[in-house]
């Protein structure tokens, strides 16, 4: 295998990259490859979507459509009141590489989130985030081939050390270059995820952040040197920054309004601070002896039955400074058994997943046990929005900058999957939580989290850097990439070609047909644990 001289466009995805993160690294000459791309190309902020979170935003980027069309709103999908981690069968629109396949063009995709299990196309794909550790790849057997050629390739880092993160980045680049030689694609998509993970784990660890970004820069440089693409597009799904406001427990507020009913125990959400359980899972805390978890679980469930829930226990422990120490020694099954949780079927409205940024109404005829009749829907929603708009923190600051009906943000055949009321925290400074706690407000569970401004750069042949990127939006990336390859975008895409790239006419593609029974469950406890550890599942 020789070089891949046929690569025309390389899309580099850097999760959570933004000016706040990149500018200091550029100023210190840490990232020569990325600095060169941003300097000689058209670049600037890239507005993310609502909600600006990985599992929903990357499908918007690589389909060019809002979640109301592609159908993914968070890390979780819901069937009635049951939930599972999203996967590629939840993405109901064609991806960039599937559209290119219709035009006879080959693609190589490495580490793109929500792409497992992959659908067939001309080229190769190794899935990224939300896939299991040993995912199905395309074509069948290609991941085994990569591992045989390059050594162990893992979807997730082996641990949370900086070295493991850099190893993961290196393996993405090596796998991409190998597959580019093997398949000689016209389009390549190379995505890096741990650039987001480090900010959930160690946002103040500047040395680790710089090491991770230097490795990304090396891998991007090596891909460009070997593949020699005509055009390089660098894009992120959202930004990242500090949360300096309050944590607001929306379901607790809805309970005070009489809209949320609660229950104790079971698989429902939320549970008691799963992210705090990392020490226990890592083996740093005392492990229970055989049979002990069952005894503890029964004991905690009995206490919950008389009102002593894990949330109340936690609040008491926090007052004496012992909450973290105890939580490290309590398995999640024990905390869950004693948790006060939202009783979804009995509630009128609730937050299912905090990163959906909104509230779902338990509507009759839509939900299995709907509590709100269609005739009352508009009144319930209007009243709820008025209550939310009036909310202020204990300091007198507005909690939300926007409270709006879902149709203000989502449109398309998958809109029924969305929340009914969209709630955007003021300046993305407040941390919205689905947990039920005795108090409405607290300190943010994570000091850094997602912000709505990502970043984009387009550099290469026939790119007019002087034209700039305009008011670039996440959904503009897909039609822009297609234009660089001379392929018309779908006329149902919500984005348009960025000004720096010569536009071409759109065309009408038939909507992706999902075969009956093609949906698959993720049902992977280790994937759920990773999401919980990062705060995506509470």
Image (cartoon, rainbow, N blue to C red):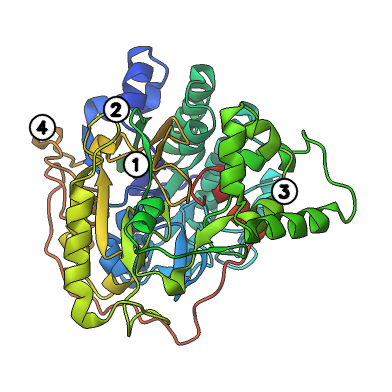
Q: CA distance from mark 4 to mark 1?
A: 22 Å
Q: Secondary structure at mark 4?
A: helix
Query: How far apart are the two marked residues, 2 and 4, measured between alpha carbons?
Result: 20 Å
In the rendered image, which residue does mark 3 sit on? 331
| Nearer to me, 26 or 374 | 374
Observer able to see residue 263: yes
Q: What secondary structure is marked by label 3?
A: loop
Residue 323 position in % (x across, y down):
62, 34
Q: Is residue 125 left or right of residue 20?
A: right
The image shows residue 354, relative to residue 458, as above or below, that is: below
From the image, tell me which residue sits under label 2: 19
Q: CA distance from mark 3 to mark 1?
A: 35 Å
Residue 523 in which image quadrant? bottom right
Cα gap from disc 4 to disc 3, whole angstroms: 57 Å
Q: Residue at x 64, y 47 (%)?
A: 154
The image quarter in which residue 91 lies: bottom left
Disc 4 or 1, which lies upstream in sequence? Answer: 1
Disc marking residue 466: 4
Badge 1: few (under 14), some or many (20 or more) residues near its Cα, within 10 Å? many
Residue 236 is marked as 1
Separation of residues labelled 2 and 3 (CA atoms): 39 Å
At a point 41% along the width and 41% down the height, the residue shown is 15
Pick the residue in front: 524 or 141. 524
């Amino acid at each position: 295998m020789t070089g891949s001289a046929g690569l025309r466009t390389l899309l580099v995805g850097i999760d959570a990259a933004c000016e706040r993160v990149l500018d200091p690294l550029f100023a210190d000459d840490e990232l020569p490859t990325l600095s060169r791309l941003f300097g000689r190309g058209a670049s600037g902020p890239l507005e993310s979507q609502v909600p600006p979170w990985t599992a929903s935003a990357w499908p918007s980027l690589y389909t060019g459509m809002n979640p109301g069309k592609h159908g993914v709103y968070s890390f979780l999908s819901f069937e009635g009141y049951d939930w599972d981690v999203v996967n590629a069968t939840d993405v109901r629109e064609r991806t960039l590489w599937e559209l290119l396949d219709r035009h006879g063009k080959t693609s190589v995709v490495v580490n793109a989130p929500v792409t497992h299990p992959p659908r067939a196309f001309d080229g190769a794909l190794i899935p990224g985030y939300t896939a299991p550790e040993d995912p199905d790849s395309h074509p069948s057997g290609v991941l085994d081939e990569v591992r045989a050629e390059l050594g162990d390739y893992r979807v997730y880092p082996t641990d949370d050390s900086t070295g493991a993160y850099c190893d993961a980045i290196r393996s993405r680049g090596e796998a991409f270059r190998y597959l580019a030689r093997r398949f000689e694609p016209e389009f390549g998509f190379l995505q890096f995820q741990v650039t987001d993970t480090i900010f959930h784990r160690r946002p103040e660890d500047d040395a680790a952040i710089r090491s991770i970004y230097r490795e990304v820069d090396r891998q991007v440089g090596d891909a460009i040197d070997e593949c020699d693409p005509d055009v390089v597009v660098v894009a992120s799904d959202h930004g990242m920054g500090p949360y300096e406001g309050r944590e607001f427990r929306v379901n607790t507020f809805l309970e005070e309004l009489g809209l949320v009913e609660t229950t104790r125990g079971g698989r429902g959400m939320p549970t008691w601070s799963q992210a705090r359980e990392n020490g226990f899972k890592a083996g740093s805390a005392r492990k229970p002896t055989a049979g002990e978890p069952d005894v503890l679980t029964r004991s905690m469930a009995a206490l919950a039955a008389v009102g002593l829930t894990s949330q109340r226990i936690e609040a008491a422990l926090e007052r004496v400074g012992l909450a973290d120490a105890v939580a490290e020694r309590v398995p999640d099954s024990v905390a869950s058994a004693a948790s006060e949780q939202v009783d979804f079927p009995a509630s009128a409205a609730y937050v299912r997943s905090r990163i959906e940024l909104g509230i779902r109404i338990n509507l009759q005829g839509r939900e299995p046990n709907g509590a709100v009749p269609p005739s009352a829907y508009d009144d319930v929603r209007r009243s709820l929005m008025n209550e939310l708009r009036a909310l202020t923190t204990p300091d007198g600051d507005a909690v939300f900058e926007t409270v709006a009906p879902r149709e203000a943000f989502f449109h398309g055949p998958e809109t029924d999957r969305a929340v009914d009321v969209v709630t955007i925290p003021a300046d993305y400074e407040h941390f919205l939580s689905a947990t039920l706690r005795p108090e409405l407000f607290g300190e943010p569970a994570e000091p850094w989290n997602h912000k709505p401004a990502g970043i984009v750069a387009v550099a290469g042949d026939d790119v007019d850097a002087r034209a700039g990127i305009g008011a670039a939006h996440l959904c503009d990336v897909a039609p822009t990439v297609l234009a660089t390859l001379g392929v018309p975008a779908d006329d149902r895409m919500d984005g348009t070609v960025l000004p720096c790239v010569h536009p071409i006419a759109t065309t009408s593609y038939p909507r992706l047909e999902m075969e009956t029974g093609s949906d698959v469950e993720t049902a992977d406890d280790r994937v759920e644990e990773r999401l919980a550890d990062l705060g995506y599942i509470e």
